[in-house]
């Protein structure tokens, strides 16, 4: 049979310092947590923990101390800001959890086909090929010099 841990107040209530036979329980370790539930979880995880005590100093955002007790806690000494909770063990049902699933549930539909790959980026287009440039014509020969002017008769004497 499985055992389940629960926490409850010791005789005398839960608001106060945990005591053992009327005096503050001294065998404990101190930790600093933000919430009492963190303190309870730590105590629950430790087999040697018998109780936890949570203390909040000042405002809600003030310091918070968790005392993990390893000796029997039998009562509470009333004090403001303190919470004392004793670990108790209860029998839990060992029957396994069974789920009934109706057989009328159809199977899930098949998965859709994978998506096609994205298109490739366009290849840069080259300009159309240009016709070859004509070769420059060979230089034309220089024109012939003009004929000499006609001879003039000599001037009279």
Image: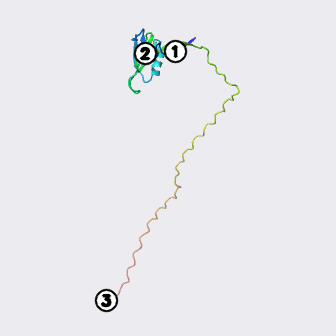
Nearer to me, 62 or 120 = 62
Q: Quadrant of the C terminus?
A: bottom left
Q: Which label was assigned to residue 155?
A: 3
Badge 2: few (under 14), some or many (20 or more) residues near its Cα, within 10 Å? Answer: many
User: Which SS class for mark 3?
Assistant: loop
User: First in sequence: mark 2 or mark 1?
Assistant: 1
Nearer to me, 140 or 47 = 47
User: First in sequence: mark 2 or mark 3?
Assistant: 2
> Which residue is drawn at the image coordinates 43% and 14% (left, top)?
76
Nearer to me, 108 or 144 = 108
The quadrant in which residue 4 appears is top right
Here the colouring is rainbow
User: Taking 21 as reference, is 31 above or below it?
Assistant: below
* Circle nearer the viewer, 3 or 1: 1
Badge 3: few (under 14), some or many (20 or more) residues near its Cα, within 10 Å? Answer: few
Determine which residue is flagged by label 1: 5
User: Taking 127 as reference, is 46 above or below it?
Assistant: above
> Which residue is drawn at the image coordinates 50% and 16% (left, top)?
7
Position of residue 91 measured from the top left corner of the image (x, y, whole percent): 56, 12
Determine which residue is flagged by label 2: 68
User: Which SS class for mark 1?
Assistant: strand
* Circle nearer the viewer, 2 or 3: 2
Badge 1: few (under 14), some or many (20 or more) residues near its Cα, within 10 Å? Answer: few
- Farthest residue to the left: give it: 157
Q: How far separated are the C-alphas under marks 2 and 3?
A: 149 Å
Q: How far separated are the C-alphas under marks 2 and 1?
A: 15 Å
């Amino acid at each position: 049979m499985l055992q389940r841990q629960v926490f409850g107040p010791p005789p005398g209530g839960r608001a106060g310092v945990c005591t053992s036979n009327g005096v503050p329980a001294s065998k404990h370790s101190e930790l600093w947590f933000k919430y009492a539930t963190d303190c309870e979880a730590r105590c629950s995880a430790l087999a040697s923990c018998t109780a936890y005590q949570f203390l909040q100093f000042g405002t809600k955002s003030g310091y918070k101390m968790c005392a993990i007790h390893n000796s029997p806690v039998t009562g509470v000494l009333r004090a403001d800001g303190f919470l004392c909770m004793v670990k108790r063990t209860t029998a839990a049902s060992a029957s396994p959890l069974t789920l009934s699933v109706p057989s009328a549930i159809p199977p899930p539909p098949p998965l859709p086909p994978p998506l096609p790959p994205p298109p490739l980026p366009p290849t840069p287009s080259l300009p159309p090929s240009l016709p070859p440039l004509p070769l420059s014509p060979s230089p034309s020969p220089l024109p012939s010099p003009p004929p000499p002017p006609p001879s003039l008769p000599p001037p009279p004497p």
